[in-house]
């Protein structure tokens, strides 16, 4: 005798289409903001050749805003995604698993969407903590999977458009009312999700939105913690630099008229002070006062043409960001400095002593520390 297949039965307002749609109204915009701001960050760090000379240097807080939104929206998406999966996971037990071509497309898009979303949020959170327990390079893989997720999301929304439309409003026509006992289930779930989103946002966003810095509990960086009250990601020791001897330091500016400067000669040049935020890809940021020599003055002394790009080379012996490049907009911006001082004091070794790059609207990983060479590129 063939035994019947027992499958779980799910009842209640927390597992119906209206609940899933309600959560999706929050989750969709969170994913969209996270994707767009992540795309901006990727282009600014790895601009394609045709765009490399057009990356803007203003507003000075541009990268701070976009990357802060990227990490905040990604963090907020974690409880939203968990709640969404809770609302829809009974669908995994549907039988038969595929009923039509449309149903097959829907299930395939959901599989890619769920797997990709879990991967993106998990690796993104671990990147914020600077923990990389995987063998692949984070940046290109995270970027590629983001396109898969957004494509699967668009496909999923297109396939589910009739259901979403039917349940979008609180009193959508043509939908069945829930049994009275199920109303509190949905309201409690949505209230709990909203509270969770608010809690994780308020306790992490202060790492970039400094008025809320006193509420930072779970962010890996506090904007006031670090040498000279400014966080660091890579210390001088971790970069293999250590303390650089001022007497032996030389800055080489290579161009049509190559020249070399000692640290004392750099300090003797006209000094300028600017207030600029340092904004890291991990989501933290803070404004500080930087003092140093304008990069445009160094370039003009080397005979650099107005359209030239600039390569900035660090004294650190290794690392993916020991070399960075700037287009003419950043290189010739009067706020772009080879900074020698931070908040009125000499740069700490962990902040790039004796000299570091500081430019407006630029990712922190490209604000090269321990600068030893500026190269004018044709």
Image: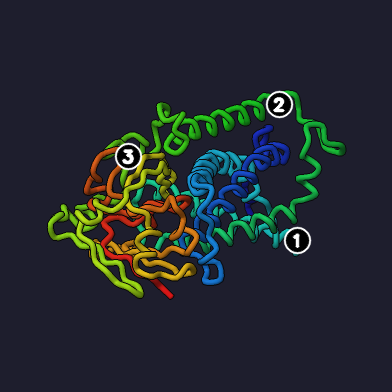
In the image, residue 282 sits, relative to residue 366, either above or below, namely: above
**Is 362 in front, or is 23?**
362
In 3D space, how far apart are the residues under numbered discs 1 and 3 (Cα atoms)?
54 Å
In 3D space, how far apart are the residues under numbered discs 3 and 2 (Cα atoms)?
49 Å
CA neighbours of label 2 inside 10 A, class few (<14), some (14 to 19), many (20+): some
Location of residue 240 in the rendering, given as x and y in whole percent from the top left corner = 20, 58
Which residue is disc 3 drawn over?
A: 230
> On the rendered structure, is 203 left or right of 80?
left
Which residue is disc 1 drawn over?
A: 102
**Residue at horizontal 43 percent and vertical 50 percent from the top:** 335
In the image, residue 288 sits, relative to residue 135, either above or below, namely: above
- Which label sits in the foreground, 3 or 2? 3
Image quadrant in which you'd find residue 80: top right
In the image, residue 183 sits, relative to residue 32, either above or below, namely: above
Q: Quick one: label 1 or label 2, which is nearer the N terminus? A: 1
Location of residue 89 in the rendering, given as x and y in whole percent from the top left corner = 61, 45
Mark number for residue 183?
A: 2
**Is 287 in front, or is 219?**
287
Q: Quick one: label 1 or label 3, which is nearer the N terminus? A: 1
- Which label sits in the foreground, 1 or 3? 3
> On the rendered structure, is 334 left or right of 38?
left
Location of residue 56 in the rendering, given as x and y in whole percent from the top left corner = 53, 56
> On the rendered structure, is 17 left or right of 174?
left
Q: Quick one: label 3 or label 2, which is nearer the N terminus? A: 2
Quadrant for the N terminus in the image: bottom right
Disc 1 element: helix
In 3D space, how far apart are the residues under numbered discs 1 and 2 (Cα atoms)?
31 Å
């Amino acid at each position: 005798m063939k035994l019947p297949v027992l499958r779980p039965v799910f009842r209640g307002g927390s597992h119906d289409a209206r609940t899933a749609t309600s959560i999706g109204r929050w989750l969709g915009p969170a994913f969209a903001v996270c994707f767009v701001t992540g795309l901006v960050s990727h282009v600014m760090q790895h601009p394609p050749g045709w765009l490399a000379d057009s990356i803007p240097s203003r507003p000075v807080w541009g990268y701070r805003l976009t990357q802060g939104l990227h990490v905040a929206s990604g963090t907020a998406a974690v409880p939203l995604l968990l709640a969404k999966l809770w609302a829809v996971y009974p669908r995994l037990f549907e039988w038969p698993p595929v009923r039509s071509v449309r149903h097959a497309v829907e299930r395939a898009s959901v599989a890619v969407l769920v797997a990709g979303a879990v991967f993106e949020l998990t690796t993104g959170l671990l990147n914020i903590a600077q923990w990389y327990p995987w063998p692949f390079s984070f940046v290109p893989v995270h970027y590629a999977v983001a396109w898969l997720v957004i494509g699967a999301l668009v496909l999923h929304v297109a396939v589910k458009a009739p259901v979403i439309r039917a349940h979008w409003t609180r009193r959508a026509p043509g939908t069945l009312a829930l049994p009275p006992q199920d109303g509190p289930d949905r309201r409690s779930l949505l209230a709990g999700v909203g509270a969770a989103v608010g809690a994780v946002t308020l306790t992490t966003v202060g790492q970039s939105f400094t008025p809320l810095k006193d509420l930072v509990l779970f962010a890996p960086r506090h904007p006031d913690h670090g040498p000279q009250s400014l966080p660091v990601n890579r210390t001088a020791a971790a970069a293999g630099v250590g303390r650089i001897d001022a007497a032996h330091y030389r800055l080489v500016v290579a161009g049509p008229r190559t020249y070399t400067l000692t640290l004392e000669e750099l300090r003797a040049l006209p000094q300028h002070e600017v207030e600029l935020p340092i904004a890291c890809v991990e989501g933290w940021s803070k404004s500080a006062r930087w003092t140093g020599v304008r990069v445009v003055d160094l370039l003009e002394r080397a005979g650099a043409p107005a359209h030239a790009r600039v390569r900035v080379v660090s004294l650190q012996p290794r690392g993916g960001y020991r070399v960075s490049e700037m287009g003419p907009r950043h290189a010739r911006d009067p706020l772009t400095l080879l900074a020698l001082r931070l908040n009125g004091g000499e740069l700490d070794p962990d902040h790039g002593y004796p000299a570091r790059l500081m430019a407006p609207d630029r990712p922190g990983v490209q604000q090269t520390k321990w600068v030893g060479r500026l190269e004018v590129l044709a």
